[in-house]
Amino acid sequence: MAKIGIVCDSTCDLGLEWFDANNVRMVPLKVLFGEESYLDWVELDPTEFYERLKVAPALPKTSQPSPADFAAAYAELADAGYDEIVSVHLTAPLSGTFESATLAAADSPIPVRIVDTKLVTHATGLAVKAAVEARDAGADAAEIEAVATRVSRNGRLYFILDTLEYLVKGGRAGKAAGLAAAVLSIKPVLRFNEEGTIEPFKKVKGLKKALAELAAHVAEDSSARKVRLVVIHGCAPELAEELRAALVEAGADFEFEGFGEIGAVIGTYAGPNAVGCAYHFVE
């Protein structure tokens, strides 16, 4: 049976312990505070990142891995005796990570299949987890790629930001750029669309109503098919608990994967106190 390696980038936000426990090779993006550069999750965990973000004089920048970074990961797996690789990544429209992986795959000593999830953070993480489950069940590379792609296409990512400032300044606001962010009482619920970019979903007054609207939508979405769901947050565990309670109260039918922190790269654009959920339909 072929030995299949799984590669991802750090923006799936699953954390170093998870990667080690599940034999997944993670290639980190970078966060730059001025001249200081940090490897996402490796040298900068979410708690430290959000503390620095709140007092930073300027918005940090992020940097994708180079093709050489991915080439090194692919060569390492080839040297370790792997026969093929499935490489699962965040949405291509918002990062050059997918392109770097694709360029590296062209010269890899073993075949590499690249999956653009068109999602970020734990929504991408759910696709990585599905790839691991398929690998551990004995699937071949084509089957693992198909599973990760299917979970991605069935994936949903909705989130509420404390402020749109970070998203707009970071140039990742997409179709949400024109929202009246200055009106503090308005809390837009945003989502990733099929193209892998951000767009407004609902615009409501107040955080509690935004949480209720999001929970009601998940309940409606899960009325026909149960979903596997992660509640995500930017160093805001209380808000995450509130959203989980709202989901239960709304009658959402979900398998709870747990709470997931938003790491430094995605947090650069989401900002502190972001909250939301990532899920896909259970087959």
Image (tube, rainbow, N blue to C red):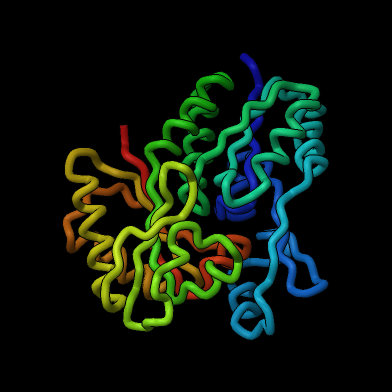
Q: How many marks?
A: 0
Q: Which of 229 and 94 is in front in this view?
A: 94
Residue for point 67% across, 45% down: 97
Residue for point 70% across, 20% down: 83
121 to 129, vertically: above or below: below
Give the x, y percent position of residue 206. Answer: 28, 78
Q: Which of 51 and 81 is in front in this view?
A: 51
Give the x, y percent position of residue 147. Answer: 46, 29
- Residue 257 makes an appearance in the image: no
Give the x, y percent position of residue 135. Answer: 54, 28
Quarter of the N terminus within the rendering: top right
10 to 79, vertically: above or below: below
Give the x, y percent position of residue 72. Answer: 81, 38
Residue for point 43% across, 70% down: 161
Q: Residue furthest top?
A: 1
- In the image, 158: left or right of 219? right
Q: Nearer the viewer, residue 20 or 230?
A: 230
Quadrant for residue 80, please give it: top right
- Residue 60 makes an appearance in the image: yes
Q: Residue furthest front?
A: 178
- In the image, 10: left or right of 252? right
Quadrant for residue 31, please give it: bottom right
Residue for point 42% across, 42% down: 194
